[in-house]
Amino acid sequence: MATTKNEIDFLLHLADNALIIGHRNSEWCGHGPILEQDIAITNIALDYIGQARNLYQHAAELINQHTDKIELTQTGKDISLPVTEDSLAYLRDVVEFKNLLITEIPNGDWAQTSLRLFLLSQFQLELFTQLLKHEDPQVAAIAEKSIKEISYHVKWSQDWVLRLGDGTEESKRRMQNAIDAIWAFTGELFIQPEYATAACLNYAAIQTAWNQKVSAIFEEAGLVIPAKTFVQKGGATGMHTEHLGYILAEMQYLQRAYPNSEW
Amino acid sequence: MVNSATTQHAEIWQILETVMDPEVPVLSVVDLGVIRAVAVEGKQVKVTITPTYTGCPAMDMIAMQIKMALMAAGYEPIIKTILSPAWTTDWMTEKGKQQLQAYGIAPPVGKSIDAAYLEDLVVPCPQCQSTHTVLVSQFGSTACKALFKCEECKEPFDYFKCH
Ligand SMILES: [Zn+2]
């Protein structure tokens, strides 16, 4: 049963990553620098919400099949059985969210937003490629579907890192500032969570591939990786920055104020 | 009773042909390539569909419309969504591609394997057929489209990306 519990936690971890980064990107809706890029970032947000739905749906399925064996939440106040994709997204509290910290930090400027997406989607591409071999065929299927979309996110965000990094003095300064601001959050990507026990996972290999690809783009853009920095971590185990609470407050307000409302 | 399983099957596919993609109303769900299987047992019909894009808001609506269309014909439909194999524009029918073109959306060029090279593609303008076109954005008005511009007639147009 430990395996199932681990798989559920891992699914929630992936789903929370997708939901929170989707939410952050959606904050650009109506605020993008030009119309085409506003549409692009909003579409990317939508892809992530879609991924989150698939992952929450599968997690809910597993939770409902194993209700006798699995402790539902740490606070456990609001969610009732059977759980749904909606209750998992809208009724869990900060300490129950398992998203990586890099997904919840504020958008900053366009450089920081596109850089964060580049660092994260490059990681997700490697991770989901490993998940194609997951023993649960539904996890493999979600990975297969997600990879098609993440490949677009990598391409889009990488173009921005190059364009700003190798652009004007001002754009370069902004992209380098973004790297300096975000870099401390990248170490957490490669800390294998305790519940990430699937045999197909190899975080060391993810890190190697990620380092290689990120360094190559930074070099091409004339950007510098900061010298040793402190690694910010804890998101995957429910220890979050102060920012997540505000995101959840905005996202969950309606469901909590008007339970089960639909629109 | 002449209503054999085979004719029932044919009837169901005919009904599905009348269910249109809400975002691209000239394209039926059959031509879009999202119907993966149809299984009939008496009045019960199981239709297996696969989403185009995971976040596509049209998918819930498509599932609902398939259900309504089959119920209107006296069936008891069950819609099952599968993710693998992942939907690809390669499953779009030739008829579907022509209908897209006529509607003003450039149909996917080549096979899904080319998806990574969007800016290298030659996408003819659906308005004037000129091949003198450029990519404006990898993302268009919906998840499935990219935005192009025609240098000849100066019109922007949607391109249904290979996926
Ligand atoms: Zn033209």
Image (spheres, rainbow, N blue to C red):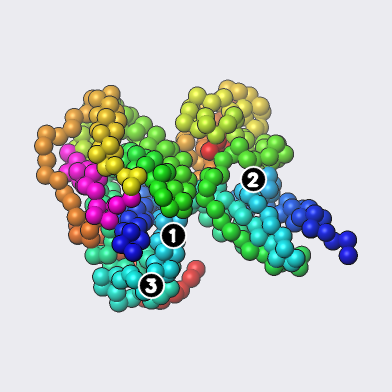
Q: Disc 2 is attached to a residue of which chain?
A: B
- Picture residue at 40% right of the left edge, 48% below the top: A134
Is residue A50 visible in this depiction of the protein? no
What quarter of the picture does the N terminus of chain A occupy? bottom left
Place of residue B84 in the rendered image (x, y in percent of width and height, measured from the top left) = 52, 47
- Picture residue at 27% right of the left edge, 56% below the top: A195
Amino acid under label 3?
Thr
Front position in the image: A40 or B35: B35
Q: Disc 1 is attached to a residue of which chain?
A: A
Task: Give the residue at the far right of this rendering.
Answer: B1
Q: Disc 3 is attached to a residue of which chain?
A: A
Front position in the image: A132 or A262: A132
Q: Which mark is residue A67?
A: 3
In the rendered structure, which disc, 3 or 1, sits on the residue that comes first in sequence?
1
Q: Is residue A153 left or right of residue B56?
A: left
Dot 2: within a 10 Å radius of its alpha carbon, few (fewer than 14), some, or many (20 or more) residues? many
Q: Secondary structure at mark 1?
A: helix
Q: Which mark is residue A58?
A: 1
Front position in the image: A36 or B94: B94
Q: Is residue B48 above or below residue A115?
A: below
CA gap, disc 3 and disc 1: 14 Å
Q: Looking at the image, do the residues carrying marks 2 and 3 touch, with CB atoms under 8 Å apart?
A: no
CA gap, disc 1 and disc 2: 26 Å
Q: Secondary structure at mark 3?
A: loop
Q: Secondary structure at mark 2?
A: helix
Provide the residue span drawn in magenta.
A180-198
Residue to which mark 2 is pinned: B32
Place of residue B105 in the rendered image (x, y in percent of width and height, measured from the top left) = 62, 38
Same chain for the residues under marks 2 and 3 in the image: no
Q: Which mark is residue B9?
A: none
Q: Looking at the image, do the residues carrying marks 3 and 1 touch, with CB atoms under 8 Å apart?
A: no
Dot 1: within a 10 Å radius of its alpha carbon, few (fewer than 14), some, or many (20 or more) residues? many
